[in-house]
Image: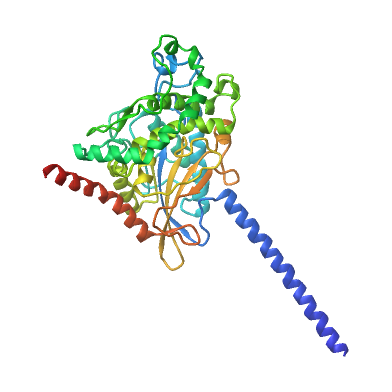
Amino acid sequence: MKKGIIIGVILIFILLLLSFSACGKTSDNKEKQSGRAAGNALSRDGYKLDRVVILSRHNIRSPLSDKGSVLDTMTPNEWFSWSSDPSDLSLRGGTLETEMGQYFRKWLESEGLFPEDYRPDPEEVRIYSNSKQRTIATAGFFKAGLLPVSNSAVEYHSDFDTMDPVFNPQLTFVSESYREDTDKEIQELFGDTIKGLDDNYKLLSEVIDVQESEDWKTGKFTGFRTDDTVISLEENAEPSMTGSLKTACSISDALVLQYYEADDSAAAFGKKLTDQDWEKIAEIKDVYGDVLFTAPDIAVNVAHPLLKEIESELDTAGRRFTFLCGHDSNIASVLASLKAEEYDLPGAIEKRTPIGSKLVFCRWSDDFGKSFISVDIVYQRVDQLRNLAILDLKNPPEAVSIRLEGLSLNGDGLYDEDEFRQRLREAIDAYYDLEEKYSLVEAA
């Protein structure tokens, strides 16, 4: 009897120990998962990181226009005094990009892809930029944070302050039938969206006090319209447009950039705007970019050189890390070419390709040697941009996984590499299919 009681007590004691141990492991796992979610949003537990290819938008720049432009003549208000010339990277933009580079350095070290104080051999890391000041400077600041003790250089190929063909979102094939079909495609996809911008235009007009402007008083401008957008598609040129959307985009762009740099009152010329108001203003420039660069037959045309560059970087022997620095049009057209589904970007007012955002392709391998690809957009939230927040694994930028139409993600948010590579190759080949299709139409 006593022996049975003793055995029972021992069993209870063992069960209690196992229970406490399990609780401890559960707590540890929760902490680990929490740490991964908070600090390593790009990471995939149980996989080894083999390679990273990033397509980045430049960071904060000054507006593209200066004195005498619509920014001057369509508002009586004084714009923010920028720290850089028109279209150039601002001082804040350089600081923010260095922080992004530092974050990626700490993350890559935590994944074991980079050792500490990494000084890569030339073939291991490539930093390649478009030849505009804002992209070269962005790449330089990113490199300073990523490789602070390396003498790796920023690579650019064209004359300074010109467009490198790899990053230039130009149409390299256009025919009359292509132009007609693509214009119909744009109207079908975005015609209603453009017509729905009335409230956005009204808010924009109120913020800039347009009725007190020189253009309003002289009758040069009588109000934004939703029915005057005309698209132009010419060979060896970027898609372009005339009309209210183009004019509104210039002002929207300048206001958004001003919001990142100035305090609340100055950013909106003394008006009190909500986060939703800022999203409405930013939506104008987002629609402008979508209209010009994301219709399927335009996207595969303008993104073709970059798609080939991304594929080449994924194939280059000995490469660990690639940073390609371009523009929002580059990211938008690449995503459209890959058939990305709609996505939401928490904490951003630019809902498509926020300033300084990065499209990140990572190759991972599991314990059995099988390879996978993750596709994420990484960006700094508005509060991080405005407060110059230090980025690290405890305070990371946001990372949002991109879903590609028709491709399945596994339980860890990864694409089978072969399936992803097939999609990438299809996007590249779509350009040649387009050429063949419309050459035959024109010849008929």
- Report the residue that reaches farthest toward the top: 218
The foreground one among 244 and 293 is 244
The tally of labels here is 0
- Give the quarter of the image for residue 332: top left
Image coords of residue 34 (percent x, y): 62, 54
- Give the quarter of the image for residue 180: top left
Residue at x 65% of width, y 56% of height: 31
Please say if 404 is above or below 383: below
Question: Left or right: 184 with respect to 116?
Answer: left
Residue at x 85% of width, y 85% of height: 5
Image coords of residue 154 (percent x, y): 37, 37
Please say if 167 is above or below 247: below
The foreground one among 357 and 21 is 357
Asked if residue 326 shows in the view, the reply is no
Image coords of residue 28 (percent x, y): 66, 60
Question: Left or right: 348 with respect to 408?
Answer: right
Image coords of residue 79 (percent x, y): 50, 18
The foreground one among 355 and 390 is 355
- Report the residue that reaches farthest toward the right: 2
Question: Which of the image's four quarters has the C terminus?
Answer: top left
Asked if residue 439 shows in the view, the reply is yes
Question: Which of the image's four quarters has the N terminus?
Answer: bottom right
Q: Check the image and tell me how it is coloured.
A: rainbow
